[in-house]
Image: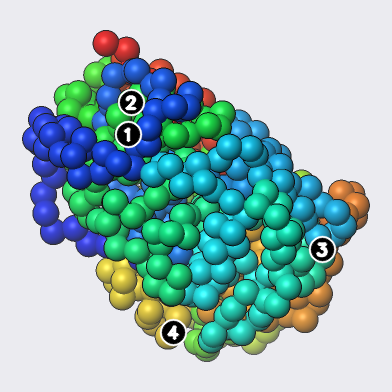
Amino acid sequence: MKVNSLWRKRALGVLATGALVGALAACGGSDSGDNKGSGDESGGAATGAPWILGTTDAVTSVDPAGSYDFGSWNIQYNIFQQLMTVPAGGTDPEPDAADCSYDDPQTITCKLKEGLKFSNGDELTSSDVLFSFKRNIEINDPNGSAVLLGSISNGDDKKPTLADGAIDTPDDTTVVFHLNQPDQTFMQVLTSATTSIVDEDTFPADDKLADDDTDNMIGSGPFVLSQYKAGEQAVFEANDNYTGDKTPQSSQVFVQYFNDPAPLKTAVESGEVDIAWRTLSPTDLNSIEKGGKAEVIRGKGSEFRYWVWQFSTDVGKNKAIRQSVAQLIDRQAISDNAYDGSVTPAYSIVPPGFAGQKDSFKEKYGEPNVDAAKKILDAAGVQTPVKIKLGYPPEHYGPNAVDEANELADQLNSSGLFDATVDDAAWEEYQTVYKEGAYDLFMLGWYPDFLDADNYLSPFVRDGGFFANGYSSDKVNKLLDQEIGETDPDARADEIGQLQDIVAEDVPLIPSWNGQNVAVANSSMEGVLDTLDPTYIFRFWMISKNG
């Protein structure tokens, strides 16, 4: 998932918790009560106490056709179903709304479970699945994630459509995907929020549904979004028509949106929110641990921070310069000095734990070495010191991003080989100017759309990547096509390893660090650790509050 999806600015201040809960509880049963269903099914059994999640994550769009970011996707995972799901702590897709399997490398057949209903009582059928995929591709929202559905689209970037014959629905409970190429990752795509199933009778086919139109924001997931106000608050209620395995433990969940980590820290320590998740700084987390007013809970993560070269600049297009920076970067110093040692140095584009992962940058460059970097530059006839501009967004990645940028600049300057300066831009501007060559080397972050090594490869190194840095390699593109369609696990792992080695040689980007999935909770909360896994899905249904 690109962390650089639209970050909506929020001008309003944080509401007091009492006002939040009171206002939402008062209107939650009237405006959207019809969405909860008749209460016939087991999903209505949730009786646990309401709880409040605090977050600095912004929401780009509640509609699955308009978002590619955590704030949006975590609403969607809780109110919609996908065909398949990755259980907490797991890696392999399991049935959600359907049981899907490969007939061959280009064909997947899904059988919907019996008795599926949306929260308004409408039946969920294969027609809704077809509608959901088709509208996502054809709306093609610039902030959306239709790019993940390339294996069933027509390949036209300007006006994509669902490819002819890509989805068959021979009956109400059967969906057959005919992929345009062998694709071993598509089963994982079916677990992503991109593939959320919406009600074709309430969602428009050719435009996004307004975020605050909760009467029509109909899904079949464990919760109903009964009210939403951008940048301020959201309230979720257990879906009485839900028939799946994700039975909510609590009847109501509130989400409070914060403009800044500082008031979020205060709120969780004072008990104004029960859980704080995304994002508190390492300094804040250490302070909370020392203060003892709330518990810092650390789970496995797959966060990836990295620096991208812009090939349109004279500096960025020079391979020797790119390699010399890869030779100089001290990742452990970045972890220690910018993040209080809370992140792990990354030596590959693919994080540890994925099949085929190897520390290719460490194998090629070893430890930071000024003499080795100078040798690379001298051999290419590069005059030193090289002027280089680093870029980062000051608000998007939290208060420690500036520390990382300055630490890297200091490392380059102290080598005597570079004259590095640091510049920044607000997130919305940053996404435009880094593509226009405002920086030679710029900071970005990534979380996975799904748990597969390819999700750290194809989005980054195929023809400039999503960040449009100008890097392109026919050899890389060929290997990407091979590994995506490879059915032999050992052969695929080897191809993924080859790709990492090429990245270390060509250096279109430089890995910096990998991070954990961290939350802060008060002592009355249970189930938080269970949902902190590399998918970064915050599973409301698993969490309960005592008292």
- Please tell me which residue is depicted at 45% across the width and 64% down the height of the picture: 65
Q: Quadrant of the C terminus?
A: top left
Residue receiving disc 4? 437
State how far apart marks 4 and 2 are (Cα): 50 Å
Mark 3 crowdedness (10 Å alpha carbons): few <14, some 14-19, many ≥20: some
Amino acid at the residue labelled 1: Glu
Compared to residue 310, the image places residue 213 above or below, namely above
> In front: 428, or 329?
428
Which is more N-terminal, label 3 or label 2?
3
> In front: 372, or 366?
366
- Please tell me which residue is depicted at 13% across the width and 34% down the height of the picture: 26
Amino acid at the residue labelled 3: Gln
Residue 214 relative to residue 350: left or right: left
Amino acid at the residue labelled 4: Gly
Residue receiving disc 3? 106
Q: In the rendering, at what x and y percent does residue 439 appear?
A: 42, 78
Mark 1 crowdedness (10 Å alpha carbons): few <14, some 14-19, many ≥20: many
Amino acid at the residue labelled 2: Ser
Compared to residue 297, the image places residue 325 above or below, namely below
Q: In the rendering, at what x and y percent does residue 431 appear?
A: 39, 73
Proximity of marks 4 and 2: CB atoms separated by less than 8 Å? no
For marks 2 and 3, give the one nearer the viewer.
2
State how far apart marks 2 and 3 are (Cα): 41 Å
Q: What is the number of the mark on residue 237?
A: 1
- Please tell me which residue is depicted at 29% across the width and 51% down the height of the picture: 215
